[in-house]
Image: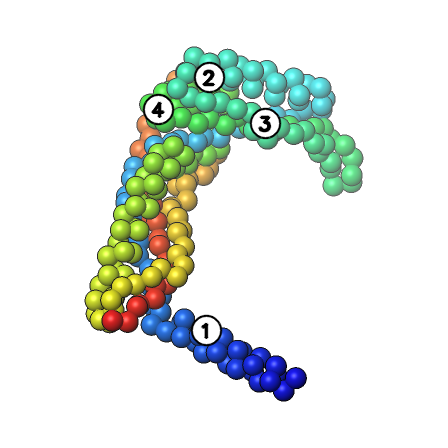
Amino acid sequence: MLRSILFTVMFTLAALSHAEESFYNRVDFQTEASIEVSNDLLTAQMNIEVSDPSPTRVAQRLNDTLNHALNKSADFPTVKSRSGNHNTYPIYSKDNHLDGWRGKAQLVLESRDFKAAGELIGILQQHMQLGGVQFSIASETRKALEESLVKDALAAFQKRAEVIRATLRGSAYKIVHININHRGNRPQPLMGRQIMAMSSEVSAPEFAGGDSNLTVQVAGTIEIVPE
């Protein structure tokens, strides 16, 4: 029994010693690769808000306006359109008397063709409000760029690891663990105020998408193998 206990104690001490040794000459550091790219996706919100004593007429006016907008959107194949929020709610006076009904509906436009989107927005503004426009990087563009940045960031990590190994006079290095993180600018809202236009003379707005910065960061730990 005593021999068994002594063996257990010795095994535990050896394991602890090995654990401490395994963390010897470990270095944490990070590298990154980044690129500035032009935003190539426009997302616009077109809104309609109506009030009427009759909820039926509110719903009808909303539906008519949205159907008209969708029909116009079909003339612009490079612009995707989809319905957004759509709701109707009662309006009460201060004495809790039902004064009427108000309805709101939204149409969302997405396009990489800024010129076509501007022309469509100009047409829709005859009957709807431009609620906002934002610019971002399209998902397929982002994916391709991030794959390239991952390669660059990993190459930079390996180069830095080799510099550390040489400086510490190790014979080699081992990667203990590594993490890859993606960072990028949020979509840029360029128009946040509502603009109402009911005239047929509305001119098509011109848009400049601006730029965003994409960054891939590689953070990890290496262990230097002594000579």
Q: Earlier in the sequence, mark 3 or mark 4?
A: 3
Badge 3 is on which residue? 105
For residue 169, side relative to residue 42 (left or right): left
Q: Provide residue 172's location: percent of width, then percent of height.
A: 27, 64
Q: Earlier in the sequence, mark 1 or mark 2?
A: 1
Disc number at residue 149?
Answer: none
Q: Which of marks 2 and 3 is nearer the N terminus?
A: 2
Residue 129 at least partly seen:
no
Q: Provide residue 68's location: percent of width, then percent of height.
A: 53, 14
Alpha carbon separation for disc pair 3 and 4: 24 Å
Three-letter amino acid code at the position of disc 4 = Asp
Residue 180 at least partly seen:
yes
Quarter that holds the C terminus = bottom left
Badge 2 is on which residue? 73
Badge 1 is on which residue? 19
Callout 4 crowding tier (Cα within 10 Å): few <14, some 14–19, many ≥20? some
Q: Provide residue 67's location: percent of width, then percent of height.
A: 56, 15
Badge 4 is on which residue? 113
SS assignment at label 3: strand
Q: Earlier in the sequence, mark 4 or mark 2?
A: 2
